[in-house]
Amino acid sequence: MSLRIATFNVENLMNRFDFSGFRNQLNQDRTLALFEIKDEAEYRRLEQARAIAHADDARQLTALAVAETRADIICMQEVDNIEALRAFEYGYLFKMIGQGYRQKYTTAGNDSRGIDVAVMMRTETADGEPIEFVRMTSHAHVTFEEFGLHTPELTALGIEPFERIFRRDCLEVDVKIAGRPLTIYSVHLKSMTGSRNGLSGREGSMPIRFAEATAVRRIIEDRFGRDHAGDKRWVICGDFNDYRQRTVISGDAFSGFHFEVVNETVSSLDVLLADGFAQNIVERRPELDRWTLYHTRGPEERHLCQLDYILLSPALARANADVVPDIVRGGQPWRTVFPPGQEVERYPRAGWDRPKASDHCPVAVTLSIR
């Protein structure tokens, strides 16, 4: 039997307004920056109108991307809460695919903005096999001290041993597919921010992601046993905010773009991949065709990279040795630079920069569960 599973960072699926831009210009939307606003009351009214108008187009595109995954189970990142997820599924997804993801799970994690990881499931697979929810376990409470993961590098970042490891959560969800057990770990690791002392945001935040990735591995090994974890059915899905490889883009639309694959010497993914503990099945795709995010700070800094992962246990990887995952890119904005031959038809109303389905692309794969 087969199960189709996907991961997708839906980019700020919120059900509340953020008015902090009135006092903090860094949080102010660029549209409102065009206008002279006399006081906070006027700012709040305008921000509400802007957010509502933008959200409808964006969430139609997000729903199109989710629908294109054809997933039986989808792990999601940047979900505000269960109410936001329900409103999105009922108001947008239902209109496209009808009855679908009746089972929805999330917990409040540690993110300062309140964005959490979540999992949505159908009640049965596309083949008609039942999907049974067994249990859900949050690991948001785990501390560096508890797992013995506090390091001098973390101390230099001002992080204390008693603080929690995960910036969001490692949400452990046990299911049965036609009676066969599968464990899903839904994660969203520390973002690449906090450049300091000459280090880039990626380098500066790397110690936190290393600790998070190590904690994920520890959780799996504690659950199944260090010597037996590779024989079990488990999958890690989510936005790791890190890459082992990226495609650097140079040139322009007039003279032509050039794409160069660059391998990184260090990545937090190494904790989970280096010794075969898990397998990144997106690496079964050609090097230029593994990207799930387009990053740019203008013409001088542009690259494509994989931030979104479906990592399989060795047992699942062996049982699906020939399976190649899909990456859904129709919700990307028009500013995204595609390598030759990869262009796709964008969804209706996708903009130059926005609206878009997300800044990330969903990754989906059909797995044999036997």
Image (cartoon, grey):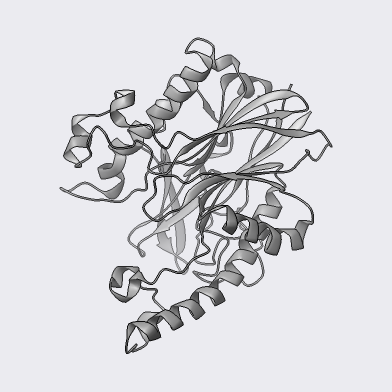
Q: Give whichever of 164, 250 is nearer the camera.
A: 164
Q: Give whichever of 224, 203 is nearer the camera.
A: 224
Q: In the rendered image, which quarter contains the C terminus?
A: top right
Q: Is residue 174 left or right of 159 when viewed as pictured?
A: right
Q: Is residue 262 left or right of 285 when viewed as pictured?
A: left
Residue 237 drawn above or below residue 294:
above
Residue 109 drawn above or below residue 283:
below
Q: Residue at x 64, y 39 (%)?
A: 325
Q: Is residue 326 visible?
A: no
Residue 95: which quarter of the image?
A: bottom right
Q: Give whichever of 214, 107 is nearer the camera.
A: 107
Q: Residue at x 45, y 33 (%)?
A: 139
Residue furthest to the top: 227
Q: Is residue 107 left or right of 29 when viewed as pictured?
A: right
Residue 320 drawn above or below residue 253:
above
Q: In the rendered image, which quarter contains the N terminus?
A: top right
The location of residue 87, given as percent across then percent down, is: 64, 61
Residue 207: which quarter of the image?
A: top left
The location of residue 351, given as percent across then percent down, is: 55, 72
Q: Is residue 219 visible?
A: yes
The location of residue 9, given as percent across then percent down, is: 52, 51
Q: Residue at x 50, y 9 (%)?
A: 227
Residue 218 drawn above or below residue 243:
above
The location of residue 84, given as percent across then percent down, is: 57, 58
Residue 265: which quarter of the image?
A: top left
How many numbered discs sit on the rendered protein? 0
Q: Give whichever of 182, 70 is nearer the camera.
A: 182
